[in-house]
Image: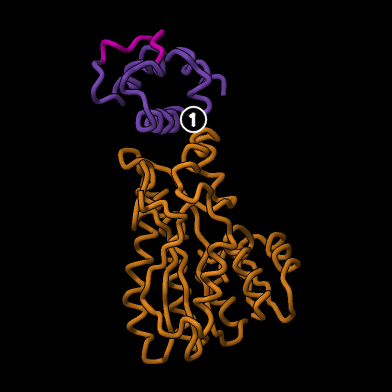
Chain colours: A purple, B orange
């Protein structure tokens, strides 16, 4: 999965935030909609698409969507 | 005592042995069961390791044990999976361990007449799925609610023989099972959750064990089909 594809599927987990607001350099924690529900969805997403287990701590440690993508790839 | 190798199951075993019970300890891990055994007072305890998810193992275990006066079904696993991401195979695994295996073991114990008159049977359920839940806990909660439902009927079926059946519904208890959620949620979230408990702490296995001792004893001889909430006041808020 490319970074662009990842940004798209990442955006799809958000019900309230328009897709256009999601870019590779988006600091996802700053989004209004970011919370335990979206965090858990992203953890599930990582498992489903990459078969990699990430944690709440990992999500806190990464900043942008691109950081997260790279983190998952490196795992 | 199923799930005796760890956590609440181990805590219950220790408490019951202290009160003079002779226990049959069941779990998958022989080493951890032996550790539980080593911590028990008294003698005459039995250790039978094996995976209760296997019908054959259940049959072997039931054949080896004497007739019982009490059973506590404590073995269980936890899983965090949101409804949108649920997969059949994970759900089946959860239901197998948490629901099908204890129920089928119970069926076998009854069939083979290993449950004496005036016995007491306890299923460890949870606040999850019954009084409360969290996101990602739907599957786990469903398995715990399943036990609460089953017990209502079982209590009626066994009442004529004086056998009582009850469930205990713990809040969050500090055991290795908690590590499962800890991996996903992290120490900060756990601490925030801890503070939400009016009594400002999570439960310890002893908190649940003391109730099991009561339920197994004649002190609770008029109690059956009950769901006992032990949650540090969590569901009040």
- Between A47 and B171, the one lying in front of the other is B171
Q: Main secondary structure of the magenta part?
A: loop
Q: Is residue B59 above or below residue B29?
A: below
Left or right of B150 on screen, residue B215: right
Residue under the point 66% across and 68% down: B14
Report in which chain the residue with disc 1 lies.
A
> Total marks drawn?
1
Residue A22 lies in the magenta-colored region: yes
Q: Please state which of residues B105 and B12 is positioned toward the viewer in this rendering.
A: B12
At which x and y percent is residue B59?
54, 77
Q: Which residue is mark 1?
A: A56
Tell me the residue at 53%/28% (across/down): A57
How far across and down, in percent of the image, does residue B108 sit?
A: 47, 79
Whether residue B212 is situated above or below residue B199 in the rendered picture: below
Q: Quadrant of residue B165?
A: bottom left
Q: Position of residue B222 (x, y in %)?
A: 41, 84
Tell me where residue B56 appears, x and y as whole percent: 54, 72
Q: Which residues are magenta?
A: A19-27
B195 falls in the magenta region = no
Q: Report which quarter residue B134 is drawn in.
A: top left
Name the image quarter holding the C terminus of chain A.
top right
Q: Is residue B179 above or below residue B41?
A: above
Determine the residue positioned at 34% across, 71% down: B150
Q: Secondary structure at mark 1?
A: helix
Residue B4 appears in which quarter of the rendering?
A: bottom right
Query: Looking at this view, is B231 or B87 the one in front?
Result: B231
Which quadrant: the N terminus of chain A?
Answer: top left
Identify the residue shown where x is 53% and y is 66%.
B52
> Crowding at label 1, few (<14), some or many (≥20) Cα neighbours within 10 Å?
many
């Amino acid at each position: 999965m490319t970074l662009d594809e990842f940004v798209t599927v990442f955006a799809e987990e958000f019900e309230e935030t328009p897709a256009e607001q999601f870019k590779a350099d988006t600091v996802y924690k700053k989004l209004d909609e970011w919370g335990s529900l979206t965090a858990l969805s992203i953890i599930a997403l990582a498992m489903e698409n990459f078969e990699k287990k990430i944690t709440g701590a990992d999500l806190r440690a990464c900043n942008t969507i691109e950081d997260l993508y790279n983190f998952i790839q490196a795992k | 005592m199923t799930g005796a190798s760890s956590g609440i199951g181990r805590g219950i075993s220790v408490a019951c042995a202290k009160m003079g019970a002779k226990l049959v300890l069941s779990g998958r891990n022989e080493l951890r069961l032996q550790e539980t055994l080593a911590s028990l007072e008294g003698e005459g305890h039995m250790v039978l390791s094996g995976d209760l998810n296997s019908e054959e193992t259940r049959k072997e275990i039931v054949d080896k044990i004497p007739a019982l006066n009490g059973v506590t079904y404590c073995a269980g696993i936890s899983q965090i999976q949101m409804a949108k991401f649920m997969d059949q195979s994970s759900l089946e695994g959860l239901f197998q361990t948490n629901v099908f295996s204890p129920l089928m073991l119970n069926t076998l114990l009854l069939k083979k007449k290993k449950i004496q008159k005036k016995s007491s049977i306890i299923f460890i359920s949870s606040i999850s799925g019954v009084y409360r839940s969290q996101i990602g806990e739907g599957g786990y909660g469903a398995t715990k609610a399943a036990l609460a439902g089953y017990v209502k009927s079982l209590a009626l079926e066994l009442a004529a023989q004086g056998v009582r059946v009850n469930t205990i519904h713990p809040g969050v208890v500090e055991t290795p099972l908690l590590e499962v959620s800890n991996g996903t949620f992290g120490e900060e979230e756990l601490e925030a959750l801890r503070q939400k408990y009016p009594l400002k702490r999570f439960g310890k296995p002893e908190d649940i064990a003391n109730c099991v001792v009561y339920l197994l004893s004649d002190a609770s001889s008029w109690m059956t089909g009950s769901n006992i909430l032990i949650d540090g006041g969590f569901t009040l808020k």
